[in-house]
Image: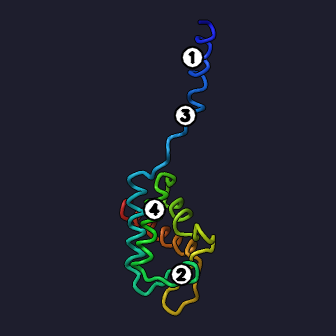
Amino acid sequence: MHRRHCLRLAALALGPVLVPAARATPSEDEHRLITALIARVRGMHEMKFVRNGEPHDAAEAAEHLEAKYKHFRKEIVTAEDFIELCATRSEVTRKPYMVQLGNNNPLEARAFMLRELRTMRQRQSRHQG
């Protein structure tokens, strides 16, 4: 009886440690920002999104980003997390994604997406302030 009581106390004391932490998810505002960022990519008809050396148009890029967002959503809290997990590199080859706009030199998708996010946040703050 005493042993059972000790085991219950130990379970109560260790319970919070043994229970996995709640999974992260983006706030509603961050979710809207992420979906707006994906929509922004979808609308860039002159863009080529290069994954593993293969160019994809804006619609294909947006579909890919949506699929990765769906896959990683429970690990994402911010739009920056989304960019790091979904728009930076291939999970298979680890090669960075690249973006080419028109005839400009390609740049890493991470830098491009962070720039677009910064622009969106600046516009958002101007409309709120």
Disc 2 residue type (three-letter): Val
Task: Say whether disc 2 or disc 4 marks the residue closer to the N-terminus.
Answer: 2
Disc 3 residue type (three-letter): Val
Disc 1 residue type (three-letter): Arg
The Cα–Cα distance between marks 2 and 4, rounded to whole angstroms, is 18 Å
The residue at 45%/69% (across/down) is 65
The residue at 47%/59% (across/down) is 71
The residue at 41%/72% (across/down) is 63
Q: Nearer the viewer, mark 2 or mark 1?
A: 1
Pointer 1 residue:
8
The Cα–Cα distance between marks 2 and 1, rounded to whole angstroms, is 56 Å
Q: Callout 4: few (<14), some (14-19), or many (20+) C-alpha neighbours within 10 Å?
A: many
Q: Which mark is residue 26?
A: none
Q: Nearer the viewer, mark 4 or mark 1?
A: 1
The residue at 62%/19% (across/down) is 10
Q: Is residue 11 above or below residue 31?
A: above
Q: Secondary structure at mark 4?
A: helix
Where residue 105 appears, as percent x and y from the top left, is: 58, 88
The Cα–Cα distance between marks 3 and 1, rounded to whole angstroms, is 16 Å
Where residue 85 appears, as percent x and y from the top left, is: 55, 62
Pointer 4 residue:
69
Pointer 2 residue:
50
Q: Is residue 83 above or below residue 4?
A: below
Q: Which residue sits furthest bottom? A: 103
Disc 4 residue type (three-letter): Tyr
Task: Say whether disc 3 or disc 2 marks the residue closer to the N-terminus.
Answer: 3
Task: Say whether disc 2 or disc 1 marks the residue closer to the N-terminus.
Answer: 1
The Cα–Cα distance between marks 3 and 4, rounded to whole angstroms, is 25 Å
Where residue 54 appears, as percent x and y from the top left, is: 53, 83
Q: Secondary structure at mark 2?
A: strand
